[in-house]
Amino acid sequence: PEYSQKKVAGLARRFTAHTLTFYTTILAHLPAIAALGDAATLRAVYSRSHRSAVDLAVAAKASLSLASPPDIYSDEQSDNNLDALLHRSDIAAVLVVLPINVQPEIVIKALAAGKHVLSEKPIAPDVKSGIALIKEYEEKYKSKGLIWRVAENYEVEPGYRKHLSILLFRSEPMKICSTRRESNQGWQDRGCS
């Protein structure tokens, strides 16, 4: 689906701010949400801590020039917790920014609630858990049209998009004879394909 042309009914953010670094990472997403313009609306924020959720809501209001702060959900509010947030019909997608040990559970919970999910990397604390998470998504939720993406999406980077546009709009066929990839030894040629 063309996500950039779809009106996303809602976007929720789930986070825990144990450290300043982690909190700063969360705030770093606000400019990206702002860049989406009318394609997305931040309707709610969630954290295990009410104070963290309030802080993010205040920052989001200022950063996104919202008329009022997004609704606040936390584990400290029995009426406004994560389950209540995921039951909202005006929330179509959630952005999951969590420590890796709790991220898989929340990704599945959001998908089970019928929400599209963008999560941070790594997706799980170990390979076995990561494979299980991917398998569960592909077996239970992908066929329902739900989208789960991990925030490392090179295909939306400007350089990749430029190369794609060059390839798509060429008038004659083109053979790619050298591609390069980054490895722990630096850039390596992969040869002619």
Image (cartoon, grey):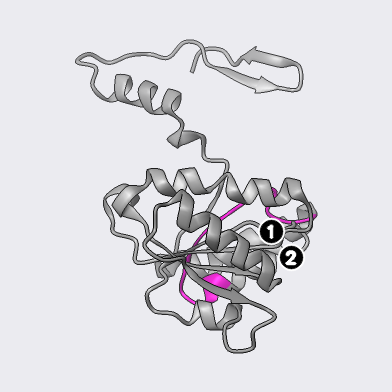
Residue 129 location (% of width, % of height): 75, 60
Residue 132 picture quarter: bottom right
| Direction from residue 121 to residue 8 in the image, left or right | left
**Which secondary structure, mark 2?**
loop
Seen at 75% across and 49% down, the residue is 20
Task: Give the residue at mark 1.
Answer: 98
Q: Is residue 121 magenta?
A: yes
The image shows residue 100, relative to residue 108, as above or below, that is above
Residue 166 picture quarter: top left
Q: Residue furthest left?
A: 171
**Which secondary structure, mark 1?**
loop
Q: Residue furthest bottom?
A: 79
Q: Is residue 105 visible?
A: yes
Seen at 53% across and 76% down, the residue is 112
Magenta stretch?
110-125
Seen at 67% across and 64% down, the residue is 52
Amino acid type, residue under disc 2 in the picture: Val
Q: Nearer the viewer, residue 158 or 123?
A: 158
Q: Nearer the viewer, residue 110 or 166?
A: 110
Q: Nearer the viewer, mark 2 or mark 1?
A: 1
The image shows residue 160, relative to residue 44, as above or below, that is above
Residue 67 location (% of width, % of height): 36, 62
Task: Give the residue at mark 2.
Answer: 102
Q: Is residue 92 magenta?
A: no
| Direction from residue 179 to residue 125 in the image, left or right | right
Q: Are marks 2 and 1 in contact (CB under 8 Å)?
A: yes
Badge 2: residue crowd in 10 Å (few <14, some 14–19, many ≥20): few
The image shows residue 54, relative to residue 64, as above or below, that is below
Q: Nearer the viewer, residue 105 or 141?
A: 105
Q: Is residue 2 visible?
A: no
Amino acid type, residue under disc 1 in the picture: Leu
